[in-house]
């Protein structure tokens, strides 16, 4: 019997030059994780943050508030570095409104492969081998974390998997060596 387990810290992701409103970096690290809604859509941020961030990025120069038809954001959200309430100007320390980088660690990567091998001597140098392998034995789903911010709801959706084996795979092998 043998197996291989791989557990590693999540990918470091960067949200870029934006402002965090209603939360700080520690709050962001705590709330950043895999979420699956009722429609089966996978996202990394809570629904309220996504909805308010979409509002914050939906700006209108002709609106009295500076925001689009969805209205101004409330509660916790990401805002563009420059917006109706802050004019971004570049200085030696980068911007005056947003932060240059906002980095957090994505979810852990977990995978376990397991195998059982039986060698049977047949005669002389001839032997038979039976092998049963289970790749991704615990059926762990490892998503590629996203940081897409913007006015479109699809920017927040996780669309790819991290790793070669997306679902549990079992294979049986029989081999004769001579």
Image (cartoon, rainbow, N blue to C red):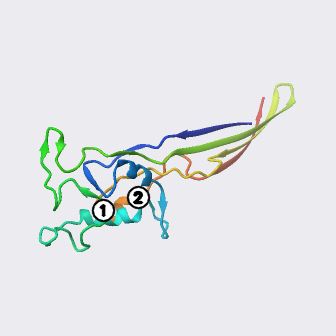
- The CA span between labels 1 and 2 is 10 Å
Other residues around mark 1 within 10 Å, as few (<14) / some (14–19) / many (≥20): many
Q: Is residue 32 left or right of residue 174?
A: left
Other residues around mark 2 within 10 Å, as few (<14) / some (14–19) / many (≥20): some
Local secondary structure at mark 2: loop
Q: Nearer the viewer, residue 15 or 73?
A: 73
- Establish if 56 lies above or below 121: below
- Establish if 144 lies above or below 175: below
Residue visible at 25% across and 58% down in the picture: 79
The C terminus sits in image quarter = top right
Residue wearing tag 2: 45
**Circles 1, 2 touching at the beta carbon (< 8 Å):** yes
Q: Which residue in the rendered view is the most extreme toward the right? A: 123
Residue wearing tag 1: 53
Q: Position of residue 44 (x, y in %)?
A: 42, 56
Q: Is residue 149 left or right of residue 98?
A: right
């Amino acid at each position: 019997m043998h197996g291989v387990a791989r557990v590693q810290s999540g990918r470091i992701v960067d949200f870029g030059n934006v402002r965090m409103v209603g939360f700080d970096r520690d709050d962001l690290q705590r709330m950043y994780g895999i979420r699956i809604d009722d429609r089966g859509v996978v996202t990394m941020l809570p629904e309220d943050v996504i909805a308010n961030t979409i509002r914050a990025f939906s700006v209108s120069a002709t609106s009295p508030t500076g925001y689009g038809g969805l209205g101004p954001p409330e509660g916790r959200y990401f805002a563009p570095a420059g917006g109706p309430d802050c004019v971004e100007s570049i200085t030696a320390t980068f911007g005056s409104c947003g932060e240059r980088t906002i980095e957090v660690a994505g979810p852990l990567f977990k995978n376990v492969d397991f195998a059982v091998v039986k060698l049977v001597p047949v005669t002389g140098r001839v032997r038979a081998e039976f092998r049963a392998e289970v790749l991704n034995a615990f059926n762990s789903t490892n998503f590629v974390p996203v940081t897409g911010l913007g006015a479109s709801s699809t920017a927040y959706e996780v669309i790819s998997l991290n790793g070669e084996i997306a679902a549990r795979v079992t294979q049986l092998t029989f081999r004769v060596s001579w």
